[in-house]
Amino acid sequence: MSELLSEFQYNTLLDYKRKKCIILEDLLQEVNKDMVFRFLGGLRIEEHKELTESQPILDFPIPKRVVIPLKQHTGAVLEPLVKKGDMVKIGDKIGDSKAFVSSPVHASISGKVTSIETHPIPTGEVVPSIIIESTEEDPIEEIVTENRRWEELKREEIISIVRESGIVGLGGAAFPTSVKLSPPEGTSIDTVILNGAECEPFLTCDHRLMLESPDEVIIGLQIIMKVVGAKQGIIGIEDNKKDAIEVLTNRAKNYRDIKVVSLPTRYPQGSEKHLIKSLLNREVPSGKLPLNVGVVVNNVQTAYSITNAVCKGVPLISRVITVSGDGIEKPSNLRVRIGTQFKDILEYVGLKKETKKVISGGPMTGFSQWTLEVPVIKGTSGIIALTKIEEEIYPCLRCAKCVDACPMGLLPLELGNLAEQKRFDDAQRLYALDCIECGSCAYICPSRRPLVHLIRFAKAEINKKRRR
């Protein structure tokens, strides 16, 4: 039963899913005149957003000590630009690389560099990091060095500012934004999509940011559109955030080339490829990127950070996160400095003694933590504490619920089996690399098999072999 499916069986299953999707999409188009397209698979999941969706963003107290990792983005590990004993000011660049796919880091507090050493980060890696201890109070407002009009800047100037400000995708992937804004020559981009879906359970930081800083979000969208030459901008927001849809729709009325679209609340609506399918009915081919179908996708918090960098000269030294879950005394949305320790944040909001698991990010795609001695990095969207977990795993029932749920049209049960058997070549032939690690398969599995972890393991081994 665990052997690789035949090509006939595989294609039969895919045909079944495609026909099912086409029927659902036709029904949706009949009732939805705004032409929001249905993507393959996906789930309705318990959201738990009521814990923090009405909580305004609060500024977390300036930390006494921060840990600034030299790898907190997709791409090259940075080289330190400071040494032990150096004094740094808030906003100083302290790490950089000459590699194209990289993003510098900055001091998030003013103080003394006490050491440069390896340190764990929320993804589970241990990476070189710069430790800074505070010597003075330093509000972020004090480092606003510019009052630039973005309309007067050239494309190359904006890309340089974004790069030097250390901006990366703040939805979780942390891909350097300057690279996204520099598509290969000859690539035509007609649409920029801002991701306001925030489909992960518990997380509401993007929701609150759209409510509290809508103008900065829209300015960031305009800046991105100018840089890539796009003629239209779309802000996609799930319909469980009606207040954010209303606020941004009112703001967007002033711009003919920008619109806000209400999306059905369905996980993983916030995935780049599924946003593109929902909003434009374009499918990104296997192994390709959104730019291959004329689209650039950015998170709303990334757009907000671009506005701060381009117009005010503020580098990415803080971000908004959600701290939530039934293990938290005071669920909150907090603006925290990069490098702030999880333990300090959890002490501030109150961590219940009965907490059994702490997750960095959302519960679907996040990483369970083995220590709280880890810093908030650029890709940290939330800290979730849970008191109830189900750990017992049972054998696969071959029920195929994971197949129905997979938004990429894959066969998670087979990919999981192949990963366990270390048959990585076979896993690659079943398109393991197309997995977006959304967690839908593990969520729906009645046997609680760790399918995402298994597929992630297979992908890592496949990529390791390809690099040799």
Image (cartoon, rainbow, N blue to C red):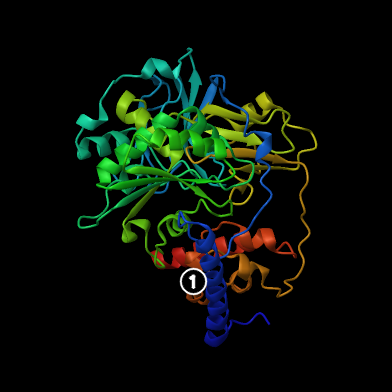
Nearest the camera: 308 or 178? 308
Q: Residue 462 at x, y = what percent?
A: 48, 67
Can residue 46 be seen from the camera position used here? yes
What is the crowding at mark 1: few (fewer than 14 residues within 10 Å), some, or many (at least 20)?
some
Residue furthest to the top: 136
Q: Residue at x 40, y 29 (%)?
A: 215
Q: Quadrant of residue 242?
A: top right
**Residue 395 left/right relative to 8:** right
For label 1, the SS is loop
Check the image and report above or below for 462 versus 122: below
Q: Quadrant of residue 329?
A: top right
Nearest the camera: 187 or 128? 187
Check the image and report above or below for 274 versus 97: below
Q: Residue 262 at x, y = what percent?
A: 50, 47
**Residue 388 left/right relative to 91:** right
Image quarter in which the N terminus is found: bottom right
Nearest the camera: 275 or 115? 275
Image quarter in which the C terminus is found: bottom left
Check the image and report above or below for 7 versus 60: below
Find disc 1 in the rendering and name its residue: 431
Q: Residue 123 at x, y = what percent?
A: 55, 46
